[in-house]
Image (cartoon, helix red, strand yellow):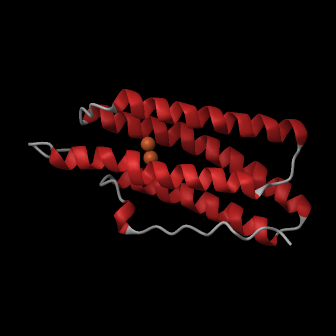
Amino acid sequence: VREASVPYIEWDTSLSVGVDELDQQHRHFMQVLNYLHDRLLRAPGHELLEARRLTIEGLQEYVDEHFAAEERYMHHIGYPDLPRHRRLHEEFTARVRGFRSAMEGAGQLLSSELMKELLTWFHQHLTTEDRKYRQYAASRPQNAT
Ligand SMILES: [Fe+2]
Ligand SMILES: [Fe+2]
């Protein structure tokens, strides 16, 4: 029996950062994680390898595109904490790169450890760091995007 302790995550409006493009990317990332979770619970072993490969590739695309878009937006609104936020993105990007090469090298089976780490990082980052630039944008005098 595979571990079933990782919950699905659901989008709700409290997770919005106030920018449609970035919200869409966050939702996409949730879909990738939920897909992986579903495969983890249901798929036979050979499908797990494939699911994990697709997920890691999807994830890498996500980090590259999403982080770039988010950093452009933060720059655009003059967000003062951008250097630190960018550093957090870079650390996560390096983790994903590490996952990918470990997976390609060893062909390991999907683990729920990976799921937990991704979910935990994503949820924490979204509800703390990404929320901060939303609050900053909302508090600016001109309140423009
Ligand atoms: Fe971010
Ligand atoms: Fe984000």
How many callouts does the rendering have? 0
Nearer to me, 23 or 9:
9
Q: Position of residue 54 (x, y in %)?
A: 73, 51
* Residue at 83 percent of width and 59 percent of height: 48
Q: Position of residue 82 (x, y in %)?
A: 35, 31
* Residue at 9 percent of width and 43 percent of height: 142
Quadrant of the image containing the C terminus: top left
Q: Position of residue 66 (x, y in %)?
A: 48, 43
User: Where on the picture, by quarter, is residue 105?
Assistant: top right
Q: Position of residue 28 (x, y in %)?
A: 53, 57
Is residue 117 rendered to the left or right of residue 78? right
User: Where on the picture, by quarter, is residue 133?
Assistant: top left
Looking at the image, residue 106 lies above or below residue 20: above
Nearer to me, 25 or 115:
115
* Residue at 68 percent of width and 56 percent of height: 115
Furthest residue in direction left, as rendered:
141
* Residue at 38 percent of width and 27 percent of height: 83
Looking at the image, residue 41 lies above or below residue 112: below
Quadrant of the image containing the N terminus: bottom right
Is residue 60 rendered to the left or right of residue 76? right
